[in-house]
Image: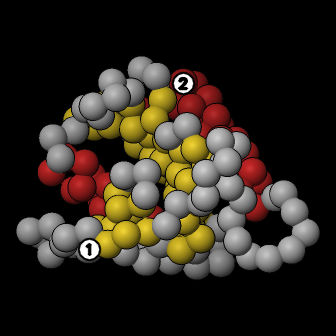
Amino acid sequence: MKHKSVFLALAVLMMASLACNALSGGGGGDAPIAPSGGNAPATVAPQNNDSSGGNADTSASGFPITSDAYNVVDLGDGNLLYYSKLPQKEILQFYRDEYVSRGYTERGLLTTTSNGVFSIVFDGDPSGKAVVIQSVDLGDGSCTVAISLQDT
């Protein structure tokens, strides 16, 4: 139980760090900040709907994102941050459906959901890294969703 609390705390800190990094950095405009590599921020390109009737879009970095995603920012180095108005249960189910249909395996022991926060980990990415998806309910009807590739 102590391990879940530590993992949850780390997940919340990572989400806060990613959100602050994405939203800070300058005085004007609503445009996202370019990643440190100097590339332009990611744009969202539609992808074919899956056979289950879901509506998955794909970010420029290749991560699936919900169809209502907004303020999508590719932070570089296998990190993506966006916002959604969907309930967290629907976001979590979207990622389970999407990644399982792609042949990935959920690490059930690392899945945590509690009090407006979830974290889920999938194995099977061609990079050999784990796909970590975390979300925090902002309390205003929106959620942040952070996706990252992390060493296993």
For marks 1 and 2 on the same chain, the one whose residue lies earlier in the sequence: 2
Q: Quadrant of residue 98?
A: bottom left
- According to the picture, the residue beneath numbered tag 1 turns out to be 55
Does residue 39 appear to the left or right of 131 in the view shown? right
At x 48%, y 48%, the residue is: 147
Q: Residue 47 location in percent, x, y?
A: 26, 68
* Mark closer to the observer (1, 2): 1
The residues tagged by marks 1 and 2 sit, at their Cα atoms, a distance apart of: 35 Å
Image quadrant containing the C terminus: top left
Which residue is more in the foreground, 114 or 29? 29
Q: Helix or strand or loop: what does disc 1 sit on?
A: loop
Which amino acid type is shown beneath numbered disc 1?
Answer: Asn
| Residue 86 percent coordinates (x, y) | 44, 75
Place of residue 53 in the rendered image (x, y in percent of width and height, measured from the top left): 15, 75
Q: Which residue is tagged 2?
A: 3
Query: In this rendering, would 64 be left or right of 139?
Result: left
